[in-house]
Amino acid sequence: MKSHPHHRTALVVVSHPDAASFNHAIARDSAAVLEALEFTTHLCDLYADSFDPVITKGEVRGQRTGDQLTNMYISLLASAELLVVVHPNCWGAPPAMMKGWMDRVFAEGSAYAFEKSCDQGDVPRGLLRIKTALVFNTSNTGEERERVEFGDPLERIWRDCLLQYCGVQRTIRRVFRIVATSSLRHREEWLREVRQIIEDAVLKSD
């Protein structure tokens, strides 16, 4: 965790089991550029933190979690003005560790709420302060094949099903492909693009 006494807060979350992966390189560069832009930046590595992605019976019923790490993640999400999420595409969905973070950390009463304080199928109120969320994914499927054969479920999951639901107005998403056969030069170009996307997003939100 890194923290400086600046006025804006950003949260970077990465889910990949290999600390030497390109996903981690994206997360580290994202955190570095945000700190350079004077954000108080928290970098959460779900694997390094040994996060337990399994939602509990109480949490499913809307009860506050008793898990200390999950509570810390909930607080970091609630205080963030900018969110960066990094993960590979796993069967058109986030990997299990990231999905568990979504399930447990986007908690009722913290990320969203219902007008009558109970879920009756109503449209919820998003509670997050996050103005802009950036989602960086890696894939080993070509863009045309992904679009024609699979659609793009991750776009709907992140933007429509989760972030917009919880009050995030603007979601920017970029997929880097094909990672398995990418050269070092490609990856360096992609990291430059990551830094540029973040800088542009911050500039537009100012």
Image (cartoon, helix red, strand yellow):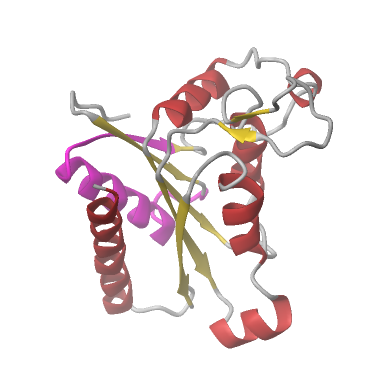
The N terminus: image quadrant: top left
- The residue at the far top in this view is 66
Q: Is residue 94 visible?
A: no
Question: Is residue 75 toward the left or the right of residue 116 in the image?
Answer: left
Task: Reply above or below: 146 against 13.
Answer: below
Is 38 one of the magenta-colored residues?
Answer: yes
Residue 140, image quadrant: bottom right
Residue 45, image quadrant: top left
**Residue depicted at x 65% and y 44%:** 99
Residue 52, image quadrant: top right
- The residue at the far right in this view is 120
Q: Is residue 12 visible?
A: yes
Residue bounds of the magenta highlight: 16-44
Q: Position of residue 197 (x, y in %)?
A: 30, 62
Q: Position of residue 30 (x, y in %)?
A: 30, 51
Task: Reply above or below: 125 against 86.
Answer: above
For the residue pair 48 and 73, the one nearer the viewer reads as 73
Question: Is residue 5 toward the left or the right of residue 113 in the image?
Answer: left
Q: Position of residue 69 (x, y in %)?
A: 53, 21
Is 131 one of the magenta-colored residues?
Answer: no
For the residue pair 180 and 100, the one nearer the viewer reads as 100
For the residue pair 154 and 55, the one nearer the viewer reads as 154
